[in-house]
Image: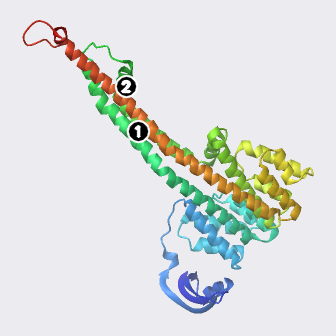
């Protein structure tokens, strides 16, 4: 396999340049023409693709997004499924991706559907990709459906990235405060507790509590360090499993603070998916069945099944959603107007945009509260520790006043006063 640099004219009569791979010049020109490019110049480079070093590691979400975008572009250009998957497999330097697409290509050759081939391979895609692939095969708009899935995945990754960046500072703040408290307990507090052990003063309860906790942490510091480190490692490991993430989401969906946020996020994803499916000429009944597959929260999936039963029973989608208490007045009116005007896909897209904006606002408000809450919590903790230490110091000074004799006389300093 050789690499070529090319200069060509695209369908908009623009001159484009780039790098392409092929077995020889003729095959490279033929593949470029299938992409709608009129080749002006083609030059062979000295780089041999077959000798590229492959990376054998599981790809990140961003890498998979790029690969799926590449696949959608190849299919849009007119390549067959076999040629498109072969191109991705041959020219990707990640062994995991290459082997997965080789497996998909082999399944296609054996007569397995494209969507089922993706389900059987090792690549893990968001749930909504699979019904999109199935609907694309049913309607003959596979490239379009795949591009819609890529667009939605890109939006989700953007939101996730923004949330991760927004949580970075509060996380660092909480981690720094926790480390500071542990250091105070491990180094400062034990010194005062050892000093108090020599006296018999009436120590305040807060001082006793702080010094006791400090001694306990200091005596079991290694246990605490190993336990906290192990908990972090286990948490990261468990977070990689989708079942565990779904379990956590189901718990968060029952909490008052995060319930509405998750409900809006999932409904936004559902409405966007349903709009895409209906736009690709999938029937409403089939589109509802596909859309339900992207819902992994029990408090929402059960009402959604009720919606599907209502639609199959003859009710309209808007009425079924209202009966299941899943949409507000705005959503009900949008969907009802879409049903009456025959533009249900467009109205669902508008409803999804409204939910997306509302969800983003809720997320920003939630994240805006984390920072002051973290500061207050850390400040209160450090304040209690310092108050306990100051009370301990005061108790030590009281001991010194009562037991120190005068230089000249037999009375204590307190009695002479």
Q: Which residue is mark 1?
A: 178
Q: Nearer the viewer, residue 194 or 245?
A: 194
| Residue that label 2 marks | 210
Q: Is residue 11 above or below residue 191?
A: below
Q: Residue furthest bottom?
A: 40
Along the horizontal axis of the image, is 194 left or right of 406?
Answer: right
- Residue 411 in view (yes/no): yes
Q: Position of residue 332 (x, y in %)?
A: 81, 52
98 to 395, vertically: above or below: below
In the drawing, does residue 408 fall left or right of residue 266?
Answer: left
Check disc 1: other Cα within 10 Å, few if <14, some if 14-19, many if 20+. Answer: some
| Residue at the image position 62 percent from the left and 54 percent from the top | 360
Q: Earlier in the sequence, mark 1 or mark 2?
A: 1
Q: Position of residue 216 (x, y in %)?
A: 37, 25
Q: CA distance from mark 1 to mark 2?
A: 15 Å
Residue at 31 percent of width and 28 percent of height: 189
* Residue drawn where x is 88% and y is 52% of the image: 311
Along the horizontal axis of the image, is 99 left or right of 222?
A: right
Q: Position of residue 413 (x, y in %)?
A: 16, 12
Res 131 visible: no
Check whether the beta carbons of the residues at disc 1 and disc 2 lie within 8 A of each other: no
Against 84, residue 331 (above or below) is above
Residue furthest front in the image? 417
Q: Residues within 10 Å of mark 2 (few under 14, many from 20)?
A: many
Which quadrant is the N terminus positioned in?
bottom right
Dividing the picture into quarters, in which one does residue 252 lie? top right
Q: Quick one: SS at disc 1?
A: helix
SS at mark 2 in the image = helix
Q: Which image quadrant: the C terminus?
A: top left
């Amino acid at each position: 396999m050789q690499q070529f640099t090319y200069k060509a004219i695209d369908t908009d009569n623009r001159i484009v340049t780039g790098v392409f791979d092929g077995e020889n010049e003729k095959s490279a020109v033929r593949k470029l023409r299938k992409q709608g490019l009129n080749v002006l110049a083609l030059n062979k480079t000295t780089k041999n693709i077959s000798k590229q070093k492959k990376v054998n590691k599981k790809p990140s979400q961003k890498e998979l997004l790029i690969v799926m975008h590449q696949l959608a572009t190849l299919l849009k250009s007119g390549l067959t499924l076999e040629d498109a998957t072969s191109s991705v497999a041959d020219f990707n330097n990640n062994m995991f991706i290459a082997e997965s697409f080789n497996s998909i290509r082999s399944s296609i050759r054996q007569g397995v559907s494209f969507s089922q081939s993706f389900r059987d391979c090792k690549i893990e895609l968001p749930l909504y990709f699979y019904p999109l692939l199935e609907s694309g095969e049913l309607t003959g708009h596979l490239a379009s459906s795949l591009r819609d899935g890529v667009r939605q995945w890109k939006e989700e990754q953007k939101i996730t990235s923004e949330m991760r960046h927004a949580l970075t500072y509060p996380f660092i703040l909480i981690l720094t405060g926790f480390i500071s408290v542990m250091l105070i307990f491990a180094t400062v507090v034990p010194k005062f507790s050892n000093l108090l052990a020599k006296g018999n003063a009436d120590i305040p309860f807060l001082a006793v509590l702080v010094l006791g906790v400090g001694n306990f942490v200091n005596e079991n510091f290694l246990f605490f360090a190993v336990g906290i480190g192990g908990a972090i490692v286990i948490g990261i490991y468990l977070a990689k499993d989708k079942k565990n993430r779904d379990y956590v989401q189901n718990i968060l969906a029952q909490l008052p603070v995060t319930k509405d946020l998750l409900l809006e996020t999932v409904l936004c994803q559902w409405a966007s998916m349903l709009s895409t499916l209906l736009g690709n000429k999938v029937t409403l009944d089939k589109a509802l069945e596909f859309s339900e597959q992207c819902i992994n929260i029990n408090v929402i999936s059960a009402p959604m099944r009720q919606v599907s039963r209502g639609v199959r029973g003859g009710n309209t989608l808007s009425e079924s959603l209202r009966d299941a208490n899943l949409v507000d007045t705005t959503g009900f009116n949008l969907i009802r107007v879409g049903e009456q005007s025959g533009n249900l896909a467009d109205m669902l897209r508008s409803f999804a945009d409204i939910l997306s904006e509302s969800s983003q606002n809720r997320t920003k408000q939630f994240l805006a509260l984390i920072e002051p809450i973290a500061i207050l919590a850390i400040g209160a903790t450090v304040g209690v520790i310092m108050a306990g230490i100051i009370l301990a110091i005061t108790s030590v000074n009281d001991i010194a006043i009562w037991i120190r004799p005068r230089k000249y006389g037999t009375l204590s300093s307190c009695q002479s006063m």
